Image (tube, grey):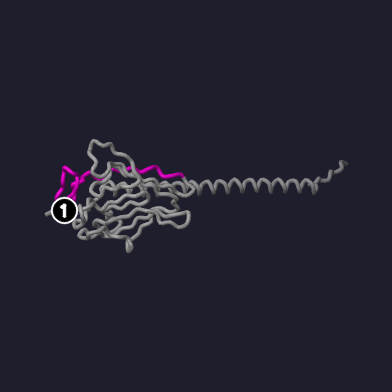
Amino acid sequence: MARSVPARGFTLVELTVALALMALLATVLFGALSLAARSWDAGEGKVDEVAGMRQVESYLREQLTALYPQRLRKAVEVPLLFAGEREELRYAAALPARVAEGGVYYFRLALARNGDKAQLVQERVIPDTAAAAEPGFASAQQSILAEGIAELKLSYFGRDPNASEADAPTWRDRWDDRNQLPLLVRIEVKPVNREPWPPLVVEPRRSPEAGCQAWDATANRCRAAG
């Protein structure tokens, strides 16, 4: 009669090794899933950032392309409501009907700083064209266009005031001619810890005599009517 062979079980060492391998595999799998989740979230965040950037640039391009030639009728030389500096741009334009009531507003594009970070903001007021000076923004309505911005750089392509058409236009950090718009406006935005936005270059409306009742074509200046 054949003898039965007793079944051999796992030793304590083998069981310990098996549990250690299972723990290692679980750790590797958890790390891989966590990395995939972070990559997915980062990808979604990048898509949202790019979409937001394109929306802001499209909005600014639409506005600056169709600047409104609003002038201060009672001020000396009847200047345009347009002023450009290194980190601030002020201009008159219509607000899209989907945003608010229609009409022409006076806008200021600038950074609202908070330590090392800042928001790209746009402020707006209703201008009084019968005033002798441009309106302030103390009680302006404000819209936040982008968060976490480190730098805003504005530059303007054009000629000096009273320059002739023969003079070559150049880029400069501020725009001093209050009777004519620059030929081009360039907006550069650098977020914090992210790649800079593609530079936005816009050609404003090219009609210096628009909005002027007595345009001096020889001097390229608007004179007070009457």
Percent across and percent down for residue 142 are 35, 59
Q: Is residue 48 visible?
A: no
Q: Is residue 24 left or right of residue 124?
A: right
Report the front residue among 79 and 64.
Answer: 79
Q: Dot 1 lies on which element?
A: loop
Membership of 210 in magenta stretch:
yes
Q: Point out the stretch of residues depicted in magenta.
A: 195-223
Q: Nearer the viewer, residue 115 or 176?
A: 176
The x and y percentages for residue 127 are 25, 59
Please give the residue where the numbered disc 1 appears in the rendered image: 224
**For the residue carrying disc 1, how many other residues have a C-alpha within 10 Å: few (<14), some (14-19), or many (20+)?**
some
Give residue 13's position: percent from left, percent from top: 79, 47
Q: Is residue 152 visible?
A: yes
The residue at the far bottom in this view is 139
Residue 43, above or below 74: above
Q: Looking at numbered disc 1 in the image, what kind of residue is underneath it?
A: Ala
Q: How many marks?
A: 1
Horizontal side of 104 relative to 2 (left or right) equals: left
**What residue is shown at x 28% (from left), y 52% (from top)?**
91
* Relative to 214, 176 lies left or right: right
User: Which of the image's four quarters has the C terminus?
Assistant: bottom left
* Image point (31%, 39%), residue name: 170
As rendered, which of 198 and 80 lies closer to the eye? 80
| The N terminus: image quadrant | top right
Residue 47 is situated, as x and y percent measured from the top left of the image, at: 44, 46
Q: Residue furthest left?
A: 226
Main SS of the magenta part reads: loop
Queried whether the magenta region covers residue 207, the answer comes back as yes
Q: In front here: 167 or 145?
A: 167
